[in-house]
Image (cartoon, grey):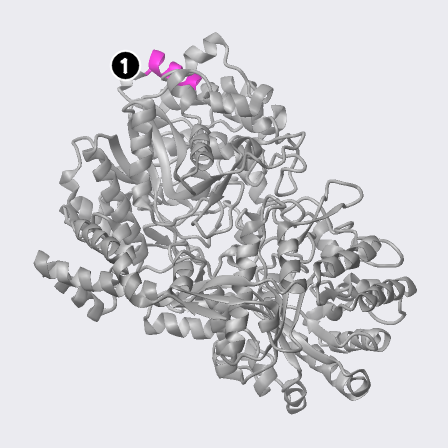
Amino acid sequence: METRRPLHPLLLLFSPWLLLLLLLVVQGVRSLQFTRDDFPDGFTFGAGTAAFQYEGAAAEDGRTPSIWDTYAHSWRNPGGETGDVACDGYHKYKEDVMLMNETGLEAYRFTISWSRLIPSGRGAVNPKGLQFYNSMINELVKADLPQSLQDEYGGWVSPKVVDDFAAYAGVCFREFGDRVAHWTTSIEPNVMAQSGYDDGYLPPNRCSYPFGRSHCTLGNSTVEPYLFIHHTLLAHASAVRLYREKYQAAQKGIVGMNIYSMWFYPLTESAEDIAATERVKDFMILHPLVFGDYPETMKKAAGSRLPLFSGYESELVTNAFDFIGLNHYTSNYVSDNSNAVKAPLQDVTDDISSLFWASKNSTPTREFLPGTSLDPKGLELALEYLQEKYGNLLFYIQENGSGSNATLDDVGRIDCLTQYIAATLRSIRNGANVKGYCVWSFMDQYEMFGDYKAHFGIVAVDFGSEELTRQPRRSARWYSDFLKNNTVIKVEDDPIVLTLIDLGDLEEDDDDQEQLEVKNAMEKRPLHLHLLLFFFLAWLLLLLLLQGASSLQFRRDDFPDGFAFGAGTAAYQYEGAAAEDGRTPSIWDTYTHSGRHPEDGTGDIASDGYHKYKEDVKLMTEIGLEAYRFTISWSRLIPSGRGAVNPKGLQFYNNMINELVKAGIQIQVVLYHSDLPQSLQDEYGGWINPKIVDDFTAYADVCFREFGDRVAHWTTVLEPNVMAQGCYDTGILPPNHCSYSFGSNCTGGNSTVEPYLFIHHNLLAHASAVRLYREKYQVAQKGIVGINMYSLWFYPLTDSAEDIGATERAKQFMILHPLVFGDYPETIKKVVGSRLPFFSNHESELVTNAFDFVGLNHYSSVYTSNNNNVVKAPLQDLTADIATLFRATKNDTPTPEVITDSIVSAENYKTYGNTVDPQGLENALEYIRENYGNLTIYIQENGSGAPDGTLDDVERINYLQKYIAATLKAIRNGANVKGYSMWSFIDIYEIFGGYNSWHYGLVAVDFGSTERRRQPRRSASWYSDFLKNNAPIRVEDGSFVSAASHAQL
């Protein structure tokens, strides 16, 4: 049922607001034009690097390991690469200084390696290290703690570090202070406290259960972050006092401290969200340096876990700085999370008790979200806030920049730098005492999170060449022109307004001459023509609003006959009982027990579905599920991978199926979800060997024979299109196969060929099982069999032919083409060449139309842009073959992988899966219908995770109702969709999030209880009301609503 509002009353209603919008737009078309000379006397522009990331020569000339070396050489490093060579700045600094001169840098910020200068952490100075820094001196920034001090007394969690750091600083002041006028003691202690000592993601990888996000070396997440902060402040203040008393008068330098700066917007205008935003700002730890004590907010939240300053220490830290350095990149939205259930143990994250949102429509996380989304206004607001709260302190912007792919034509970086430099100038004109701006980074280096794959440098480094060749990017030439030639920069004074009227795109595509001409023509028009033009555009915006201001109301009964609503789980993530009743390890068991999984814990118990399935089926009945999609554990049913069937495993699945039959719930079985018996992996390499085809077919035969009298819906394999990359290219998922330089910490493999072997043998195994079912069982059992694909919708980032081509290329790698046409698409054959296996005539016939349906796991959408202009390496992997960059939002830093290690290991897990874009599902279904025919489709996974496990999961309800509405709209537009299964029925051991990070279930599970207690969430009641009571759902309909959601992706 659809209802539409009359048009004319709405026109009258919106007219005053339209005029207001027009005035705002006209107000915003003013531009800021400036040159280098517009900045105050004494202001310096520079760029920076950091020792471990830049120098290399890790074991040369007396240098000893730091905690960063230990981390990079351990399995904890998700990238698998090290800083042993880095940019080889130790040997190439003279060349780099020449490049700095050519660029026109006025300052260069670099860090000194403590373990190069004083290899034991204290005591004797290394002459070779001293000689190196004497050759390239500017400033002391961040100390990468010598591993010897970490081993001896725990490093920064011990008060002993204060004296050792002061002694180290004393050496630097004494040896280099005659030429260094600008010292920074430490970088970003406010966020390193959380990353290094709470969740343990960064060195020294200290954390404690259940707070750590990765297998930590040891630690205590409840107290060590505060010890780190406390001792960092005291060490800093001790070094400052030493400098002021002994060196400053003669050397005439200044000394300060650096903090990681973000701007935080309250998510709503509620008092709670505003208070949460202020609480987050208090944890920046600037308060003790100005007032000599922690803010009351921190003291109240942390209690006795927060160390106290003695009277002497308070005096020591107060005003212990000449300046404050800011590393500023982006902004977050903040909402209150103080009503969450408080655990007996709390960490810093719990104390902050806030949720962070990259955008208003994103999925929140309990940890702040660093990134490179463009928000120059946030920098202005941050400087204004600091000025109002702490006085007009002296500031240096010590890091600001944007990452990109390896392209030399880095127009996006230029746009970012332009806007942030303009924001800096506006802040200065508004009274901020900012004395310098430093680009991050001067050159590509070993990045903290991105290894050698993230490129922040204005100078490119070819890490594939033995010489590590340097080449200035377009941004270097732009920066040089600004600094040396005083070139004019012009930016719009209110970019937010420009975004509203969608003129930002006119600035983004420098290669589109037609758009440039339009932009230039607009800039030359007099004001009254601007008024007319913007009035027209604003009126057009109103018409779009009105077009979209209709609603779609529907009920369960509006779906076609035979349509089934359900929910799902997966064997390893749900069953538990990993070593009970004859089950043997799968590759998932090996993976989680090896320490590679970013979360503590394994699937050994999971949701304990092996013992609690009867209770769960009862819950399904109470909710009103019409279908239940679950997977069978191959290694539970056939422990050796082939041969004898395990009676206990057979009994378990028969019992569960019988319970579902009694409940009247349709049974949808998946045969394989990345849990290959380890015995087959060890014997012949699993899916990369053609032997897998016969073994999988025999396993499928057992399932068809034993369960097919009650199972009418079979799916052979899940998500082979993305598992090829995650399991065999980047190697972040089991069996962790990859090869240098494509993957990280892998057990073996070859990233150039194995992803395609995996896909090829998956298709053949699937097709073989389908033929068996059709020939032997389908007539009698009257079931259907299909395959599943991971589905994203891809929007081209721009309207350029290159980005549109990249988008089509990404869609081709869904691998649906061989199942419809019997061969790989020409796109794939052309880029992969001889690395792509070919189908024989028999195999082509076997795979063609080898499905009764296609299952889609669909969560969200991404932007895609072309990446095939990068220099082709002698070896290429699947990622390079796709030659596409993916962004969750238009302003995100792009990644060349659909599934990346940052998603796996950081708080951004399943970013794609939690951004609401129901239009993307409609587009995906339409694309499949247009390109492959009107196939029978089942939506087998769709859902939204919550990081806090709340029972009041309103956001999940909002997400689900929008996607269910999109499914109905797609059906009404001709899509042959027969079912919808939300992910997941119950909280489970998530592939990326383990037990702690993400909760997707309609039913909550208390993983802290021995009984694994279940409790339905609000979404379960909502789903039940829709399914059992035919309750109406009403959602906004029309293109504008979807576009608005999509615009905030």
Where does the image place residue 914, in percent across and percent down from the top left?
53, 56
Q: Is residue 959 above or below residue 228?
A: below
* Whether residue 771 is visible: yes
Element at label 1: helix
At x 78%, y 69%, the residue is 664
Q: Nearer the viewer, residue 771 or 485?
A: 771
Q: Residue furthest right?
A: 647
Residue 11 is left or right of residue 697, and the answer is left
Where does the image place residue 94, in percent across and percent down from the top left?
32, 43
Specify whether residue 246 is painted magenta.
Answer: yes
Q: Which residue is mark 1?
A: 249
Using the rendered view, name the quadrant where residue 141 is placed.
top left
At x 44%, y 26%, the residue is 285
Q: Nearer the viewer, residue 176 or 657?
A: 657
Residue 496 is left or right of residue 1038, and the answer is left
Q: Nearer the viewer, residue 1029 or 1039?
A: 1029
Where does the image place residue 744, in percent across and percent down from the top left?
58, 54
Residues in magenta? 237-247
Residue 435 is left or right of residue 1020, and the answer is left
Q: Is residue 869 above or below residue 1048?
A: below
At x 89%, y 57%, the residue is 581
* Whether residue 65 is visible: no
- Magenta stretch, main secondary structure, is helix
Q: Is residue 425 above or below residue 959?
A: above
Using the rendered view, name the quadrant where residue 104 is placed.
top left
Dot 1: within a 10 Å radius of its alpha carbon, few (fewer than 14), some, or many (20 or more) residues?
few
Question: How many marks overall?
Answer: 1
Q: Quadrant of the C terminus?
A: bottom left
Give the residue type at disc 1.
Answer: Ala
Specify whether residue 784 is painted magenta.
Answer: no
Where does the image place residue 324, in percent across and percent down from the top left?
34, 27
Residue 512 is left or right of residue 738, and the answer is left
